[in-house]
Image: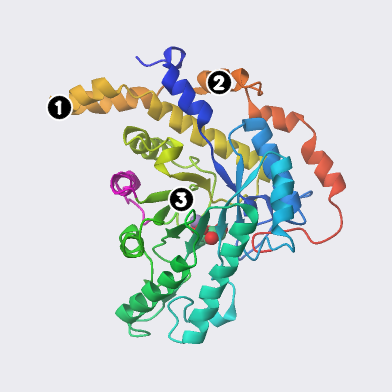
């Protein structure tokens, strides 16, 4: 029986070194098209979002980077924003472009039949690359919301050709230390075709672009029943898994707390990461969250998310690889499955608490943050002004 008390030093080191990137937009108000509930104390600007990110990092010791979304996080001086973040122990992570909130993009952005609109969308990415230069970010993340609603509305192949050309221009603007991370999503905002609906399409474009392009796997962007860990294994095998957008979904792109609905799926995903040696930084997989906290408090929601990823990772690291290989090669179907289940059923919370204590952190970051009084403090301090939300 696996117990976390006997965890090998490599397991402890890997857990101690693991980092998770937080999305700036998780800290603002968010909701659905029906209602956005507002939470007292939510940030009023990108600086306050970063202050909240720093809290998650201070309590977990595992969240030293923040993704920004442009233009939601637009500031006059991005170097100053990065310097402010660095003072709080936070680095600027992926810069997310935004192609989904502009009337010009109704019929597409990078795929639009009108070259002037395509140029506008390409120029927006050049603006994001300037933000990367000013902040020290190395990842440009592109989610393409383009698609069509009706058969015959546009030429499917023509849109792919225009997309390939637009992506080439963006790719050519990157610095040598930059990456272009291309996300996929199977439906929404369009319902007949999406121009990058799946990992295969994203991969095809990444392969055409070159070594600096890789796929982003958002766990919420798959049809029900999709075997996500298979996709992970295949992309890692090809060296093309650039990042995760972690979240949990029940129906579609619900963006709920990662590991909430199906912690076993998260374990299976992390198992593919661990067994393919993709947890270490050199593997180039950026473990990011892409979530919104509509009804729960934001900072505790992010702390819980980080802890969920850590727990799934710890269980994956505890899999007895030798016993698994033996069972697999001898055709012991149920034995192999039992090895995985044994690790999954291990309570890894004491192990993670120990590792935190060794780093001088609270053993339970969630409880420690809640006891800190920070939420009351920001509710009192951040009055007036426009509260930032998902999209502002
Ligand atoms: C789209 O659903 C998405 O997953 C993309 O990553 C966007 O940039 C992000 O959500 C915004 O929350
Ligand atoms: Mn996403
Ligand atoms: Mn999404």
- In this view of the protein, which residue sits in the foreground, 130 or 260? 130
Q: Quadrant of residue 384?
A: bottom right
**Looking at the image, which residue is at 31% across and 27% down?**
340
**Looking at the image, which residue is at 55% across and 79% down?**
120
Mark 2 crowdedness (10 Å alpha carbons): few <14, some 14-19, many ≥20: some
Mark 3 crowdedness (10 Å alpha carbons): few <14, some 14-19, many ≥20: few
In the image, is 181 to the left or to the right of 323? right
Spot occupied by residue 55 in the image (x, y as percentages of width and height): 70, 38
Outermost left residue: 330
- Give the residue number, with chain letter if any, for mark 2: 355
- Does the numbered disc 1 mark a residue whose Cβ is under 8 Å from ligand 2? no
Q: Earlier in the sequence, mark 3 or mark 1?
A: 3
- Give the residue number, with chain letter if any, for mark 3: 250
In the image, is 79 to the left or to the right of 9? right
Please give the range of residues in magenta: 222-239
| Rendered-image quadrant of the C terminus | bottom right
Spot occupied by residue 33 in the image (x, y as percentages of width and height): 60, 66
Question: SS at mark 1?
Answer: helix
Question: SS at mark 3?
Answer: loop
Q: Earlier in the sequence, mark 2 or mark 3?
A: 3
Question: Please, is residue 342 above or below residue 119 in the view?
Answer: above
- Does the numbered disc 2 mark a residue whose Cβ is under 8 Å from ligand 2? no
- Give the residue number, with chain letter if any, for mark 1: 329
In the image, is 133 to the left or to the right of 115? right
Question: Please, is residue 313 above or below residue 259 in the view?
Answer: above
Distance CA(mark 3)–CA(mark 1): 36 Å
Question: SS at mark 2?
Answer: helix
- In this view of the protein, which residue sits in the foreground, 235 or 140? 140
**Looking at the image, which residue is at 48% across and 47% down?**
248
Regarding residue 95, the answer to whether it shows in the image is yes
Mark 1 crowdedness (10 Å alpha carbons): few <14, some 14-19, many ≥20: few
The reply to whether the magenta stretch includes residue 235 is yes
């Amino acid at each position: 029986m696996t117990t976390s008390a006997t965890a090998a030093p490599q397991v402890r080191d890997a857990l101690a070194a693991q980092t998770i990137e937080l999305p700036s937009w998780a800290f603002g108000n968010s909701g659905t098209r029906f209602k956005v509930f507002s939470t007292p104390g939510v940030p009023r600007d990108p600086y306050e979002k970063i202050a909240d990110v720093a809290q998650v990092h201070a309590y977990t010791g595992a969240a030293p980077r923040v993704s920004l979304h442009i233009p939601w996080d637009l500031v006059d001086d991005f170097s100053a924003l990065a310097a402010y973040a660095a003072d709080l122990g936070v680095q600027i992570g992926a810069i997310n472009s935004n192609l989904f909130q502009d009337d010009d993009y109704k019929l597409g952005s990078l795929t639009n039949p009108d070259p002037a609109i395509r140029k506008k969308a390409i120029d927006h990415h050049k603006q994001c690359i300037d933000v990367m230069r000013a902040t020290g970010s190395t990842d440009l993340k592109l989610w393409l919301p383009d698609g069509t609603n009706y058969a015959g509305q546009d030429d499917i192949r023509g849109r792919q050709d225009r997309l390939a050309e637009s992506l080439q221009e963006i790719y050519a603007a990157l610095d040598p230390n930059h990456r272009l991370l291309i996300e996929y999503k199977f439906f929404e905002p369009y319902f007949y075709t999406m121009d990058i609906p799946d990992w295969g399409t994203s991969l095809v474009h990444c392969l055409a672009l070159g070594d600096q392009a890789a796929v982003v796997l958002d766990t919420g962007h798959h049809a029900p029943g999709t075997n996500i860990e298979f996709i992970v294994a295949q992309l890692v095998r090809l060296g093309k898994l650039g990042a995760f957008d972690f979240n949990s979904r029940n129906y579609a792109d619900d963006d709920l707390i990662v590991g909430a609905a199906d912690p076993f799926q998260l374990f299976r995903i992390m198992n593919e990461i661990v067994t393919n040696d993709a947890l270490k930084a050199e593997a180039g997989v950026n473990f990011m969250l892409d979530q919104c906290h509509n009804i729960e408090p934001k900072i505790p929601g992010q702390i819980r998310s980080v802890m969920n990823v850590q727990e799934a990772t710890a269980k994956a690291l505890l899999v007895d690889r030798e016993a698994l290989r033996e069972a697999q090669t001898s055709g012991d179907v149920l034995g192999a499955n039992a090895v995985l289940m044994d690790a999954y059923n291990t309570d890894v919370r004491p192990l993670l608490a120990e590792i935190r204590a060794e780093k001088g952190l609270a053993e339970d970051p969630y409880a420690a943050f809640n006891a800190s009084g920070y939420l009351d403090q920001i509710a009192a301090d951040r009055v007036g002004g426009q509260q930032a939300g998902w999209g502002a």
